[in-house]
Image (tube, coloured by chain):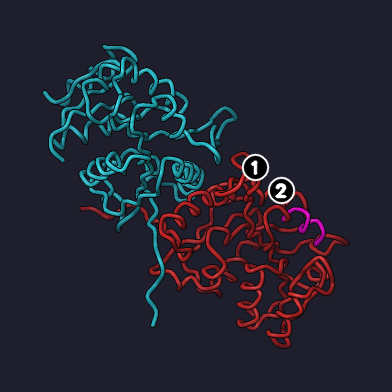
Chain colours: A red, B cyan
Amino acid sequence: MKQTNIAVLGTGMVGKALATALVERGHRVTLGSRKAQHEGAAAWVAENGENAGQADFATAAAASQIVLLAVKGEHAEAVAAAAADGGALDGKVLVDITNPLDFSQGMPPSLFVFGRDSLAERVQRAAPKARVVKTLNTVNASVMVDPGRIEGQTAVFVSGDDADAKATVRALLEGFGWQQIIDLGDLSTARGPEAYLLLWLRLWQATGSADINIALHGAAKRD
Amino acid sequence: MKQTNIAVLGTGMVGKALATALVERGHRVTLGSRKAQHEGAAAWVAENGENAGQADFATAAAASQIVLLAVKGEHAEAVAAAAADGGALDGKVLVDITNPLDFSQGMPPSLFVFGRDSLAERVQRAAPKARVVKTLNTVNASVMVDPGRIEGQTAVFVSGDDADAKATVRALLEGFGWQQIIDLGDLSTARGPEAYLLLWLRLWQATGSADINIALHGAAKRD
């Protein structure tokens, strides 16, 4: 993918991992947060050279062709709405990486939206003129930007209503090294990978490692 | 596994596929249904020789060491309770293969229990003296009894509170050819593989094949 202006909304572990990986691949990255000046974002900018910047959510989105939503699930809709302010997300590819984790009753979490709706669809409703694509929510931050951490070829899923937006996201994923990129269909198919998080959490618990992922296998060739 | 008396509760596609595979492996199998005489079960018995029988749920369970619950999710608790009648499931290994699919609002289905409870846990409450183990709900009937239909080694999950019951189920799964058998932990971990069904449905839709499964991959060895 050519050098692109990309916003990463969210200054947590996932946001910074994505932003750093994108700067390393030559993109100009604006780390977005609630305020124009954010202490953690400033530290990240200081470490990542001239292609790294920071701004509030809407300013970061306005400066970018692609916007990654990498906040806690509970904030996803509010941040998408804030970033859409003044038309900053109109027509933009909005990559939703969030998970609707509900920790309100302790560990392990449940999901606060599920089954007949998804956080991806809620984000789309919060930013109706963005072209939302769900992806990368099924692996941890380190694996997102470096799938080679996992042995073999494993899967990442893509859900979205706009084919061009999905092609853009596919190029982004290929830039991170992903090869088994599975297009599940329209945005409502994000209900699948969001529900999968509950299995991921149990696999993490059972294996004791967050460096895990799944591969999709099809029918064997038999004589 | 030595010849064992096994009950399969449910005369649908999943029940018959499991029952047939178990007869083929030399076990004595009783297909259980609501009535002592069931037309579909009678046809199955006629096709499967002297080790095949039929009975009502509780009679089938009483005659068996291992009981497989292979009914539609909406009937799972009632059938478990019926099979437990008269103590027929006391101490028995009850293998729960059901999925809590909710078709009440059309396709694709959602789940009628999710997140902070599971159908496996409900089945356990319906048959409190059984030793419930959840497994095999993440693949279709053909793959359950013949994982070699899928290329490579793929995963099947096991959840249960009783270690001996899980060891029995592991032997059963190995008899079907399963090799990547992942013990997720106690019965509440069944919430993970039950939620995964929503991803499975989307993968089925996207690939156009029910001959699919996932493999679990861990960290790559790097220098």
Q: Main secondary structure of the magenta part?
A: helix
Residue at the left extreme?
Answer: B50
Residue A15 on image: x %, y %: 66, 69
Figure quadrant of residue A158: bottom right
Which residue occupies the foreground of this view, B59 or A170?
B59
Residue drawn at the location 71% of the way across and 73% of the way down = A6
Q: Which residue is mark 2?
A: A122
Q: Is residue A66 above or below residue B161?
A: below
Looking at the image, residue B83 sits to the left or right of residue A182; the answer is: left
Figure quadrant of residue B27: top left
Figure quadrant of residue B2: top left
Instruction: In the rendered structure, find residue B82 and report the number of the disc placed on it.
Output: none
Which residue occupies the foreground of this view, B115 or A133?
B115
Residue A101 on image: x %, y %: 62, 51
Marks 2 and 1 close (CB-CB < 8 Å): yes
Looking at the image, residue A112 sits to the left or right of residue B177; the answer is: right
Quarter of the image with the N terminus of chain A is: bottom right
Rounded to the nearest angstrom, the CA distance separating label 2 from label 1 is: 8 Å
Residue at the bottom extreme?
Answer: A50
Establish whether labels 2 and 1 are both on one chain.
Answer: yes
Q: Chain of mark 1?
A: A
Q: Residues within 10 Å of mark 2 (few under 14, many from 20)?
A: some
Which residue occupies the foreground of this view, B186 or B48?
B186
Q: Is residue A175 above or below residue B156?
A: below
**Mark 2 / mark 1, whichever is N-terminal:** 1
Q: Residues within 10 Å of mark 1 (few under 14, many from 20)?
A: some
Q: Which residue is mark 1?
A: A117
Range drawn in magenta? A76-83
Amino acid residing under circle 1: Asp
